[in-house]
Every structure is written in structure tokens, then in C-alpha cells.
Amino acid sequence: MTDRLLVGTRKGLFRIERNVNGRWEIAGNWFLGDPISMLLVESNTPRIHAAMDLGHFGVKLQRTEDGGKNWSEAPTPAYPEKPDEVEDKEPFRGLEVPWSTQMIWSLVAGSPDELWCGVIPGGLFRSTDGGDSWQLIRTLWDDPRRKMWMGGGYDFSGIHSILVDPRNSAHVTIGVSVGGVWTT
């Protein structure tokens, strides 16, 4: 049984611990007032990633290597520049799909130093260096069927679930809002 919980909210990231009387209480916080859209505590390491949706200031990632004592900004997944000749519109309302990260919606660890990140609009990114750099999975992004994805509550589709097979980290399954389930 764990004696610590980390909870990401629209009001920040909170550390909740069991006190000496066995009751749960807020023992600390980080990023007070900032909306946390996703949180990842990497297994068997003190590394924690916190994704933030800061509205006008954009999407940010913070990372700690020491369990929360010190935080630093980490690179966020970024799309390549959209070619001028590409038309990319959301099918229901015809809105132009932005080629920029609007929100980090899912974040999971694979093999050591491998991270997978699902974002709005429906992009899947992979890092093989613990989040120091990100690569867009172009086979999924360039698949013509992506043009039929649409937002299911958000303006654009998003990758909300990522499952990395613990027996084979090359086998990844994702859930896409109003886009189905995809697997390698």
C-alpha cells in the first residue's frame, strides 16, 4: 500500500500523504494555479513528468529527476511545419487542424528512457531519451484515415490512451477520440 499520491488538477499538482494518524492530507504542491493535463511517475525512478495546458502561454512540460525537489522545463512534442500544399480540415465543422500541440492528453513510459505522448490534435510522439527530444509518428499522422477523426468534446481529435505491451515495447496500442483503436 502506498502512502503517497500525486494528483494533477486544474489548480496545480498536489502531493497527498498519509499522516501519523493514518489520515490523508495535502503535504505539498507544485505549480499552484496551473492546470495539469497529464502526470507521469516513471516506475523505479524518481523521475516525474507534469504536462501543463497554460492557455495563452501554450503547452509546457516540467520534469523532475529527484522526486519533486527540483523541477525544470522539458521540451514539448512539436509538429513539423505544415506544407503549404496540404489541406487538413476537421471533417465535422471544416476547421483547419492546427499543426501545433494544443494539449498533452496521455503520457506513458515504455522501455527505459522511452516515452510515448498522445496530444490534441491527434498526434502520437515518441522519445527515446527520457523526453529530451520527441519524434512525431508520421505513419499515423500521414495516414489518410486520420482526416476522418474529429474532436469528441474538444475541437480536434486527440490520443487519449496509450498502452505499451510490457512484454514487447514495440507493440503499442492507442485510443483516439472519435478515431478508434490503433495498434502496431
Image: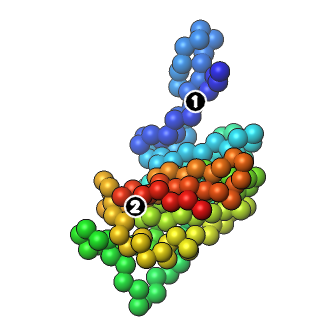
Q: Earlier in the sequence, mark 2 or mark 1?
A: 1
Task: Give the quarter of the image for residue 58.
Answer: bottom left
- Residue 21 rendering spot, x and y as whole percentages: 59, 8
Mark 2 and mark 1 in contact? Answer it, CB < 8 Å: no
What label does residue 179 carry, if any? Answer: 2
User: Circle 1 is placed at which residue position?
Assistant: 5
* Residue at the (53%, 21%) spot, across then down: 25
For image coordinates 63% across by 51% down, the residue present is 164
Q: Residues within 10 Å of mark 2 (few under 14, many from 20)?
A: some
Label number found at residue 25: none
Above or below for 78 versus 41 = below
Image quarter for residue 3? top right
Compared to residue 169, the image places residue 39 above or below, namely: above
- In the rendered image, the residue lying farthest to the top is 21
> Which percent across, then down, holds residue 146?
42, 70
Assess disc 1: are there few (<14), some (14-19) or many (≥20) residues with their C-alpha within 10 Å of its C-alpha: some
For the residue marked with disc 1, what is the amino acid?
Leu
